[in-house]
Amino acid sequence: MKKIAVFPGSFDPITRGHESIILRAATLFDEIIIAIGKNAEKKHFFPLEDRMRWIEKVFEEYPNITVTNYKGLTVDFCQKVNARFILRGLRTSADFEFERSISQINKKIIPEIETIFLLTTPEYTALNSSIVRDIIFHGGDPGQFVPEAVRDDIR
């Protein structure tokens, strides 16, 4: 059976931390689906189309990594695409507590789906999309915090 993992998130924008987790996980799974969740109640800084295009550009050399978007529960989306794994990156203990709760609820809903946690590498522990958005909003240069393939676009 093919090992398919879904890496859900808003990727608003994708960061070097996201890129690191995905590339490290690409050796563990046959396929990784980067899934941008649609939430009508959440206001995003970047349009969905841009976020999808940037992710496609970052991983264009990796045929086992794709990007899509979805609505609804992540576990339902996993079933739809035959994914048995949800991939999540952990930066801090606060991330762990938050992700653990979601993982346990997901396990109650669909017991066959496992959540796999990868720790961020130390240089990306403080990095998140909110910080990158704040840098951009205030006219700063986000270049060192986003993947090289999309630096010029995101600026």
Image (spheres, grey):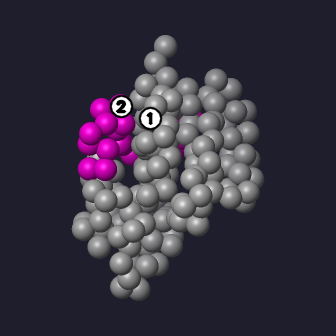
Q: Position of residue 100 (x, y in %)?
A: 72, 46
Q: Which residue is mark 1?
A: 26
Which residue is drawn at the image coordinates 32% and 44% (left, top)? 59
Secondary element under disc 2, as helix, strand or loop, is loop
Residue 133 locus on image (x, y percent) = 44, 73
SS for dot 1 = loop
The three-letter amino acid code for the residue at tag 2 is Asn
Indicate the quadrant where residue 137 lies.
bottom left
> What range of the chain is rendered magenta?
57-76
Residue 127 painted magenta = no
Answer left or right for 76 relative to 56. Answer: right
Residue 45 can be seen in this image = no
Residue positioned 48% across, 65% down in the render: 129
Residue at (56, 31) in percent of width and height: 85
Determine crowd level at label 1: few under 14, some 14-19, many 20+ residues with C-alpha closer than 10 A.
some
Quadrant (top left, top right, bottom left, bottom right) of the C terminus? bottom left
> Residue 121: where, in percent of width, then height?
57, 53
Q: Nearer the viewer, residue 146 or 97?
A: 146
Identify which residue, 46 or 22, lies in the foreground: 22
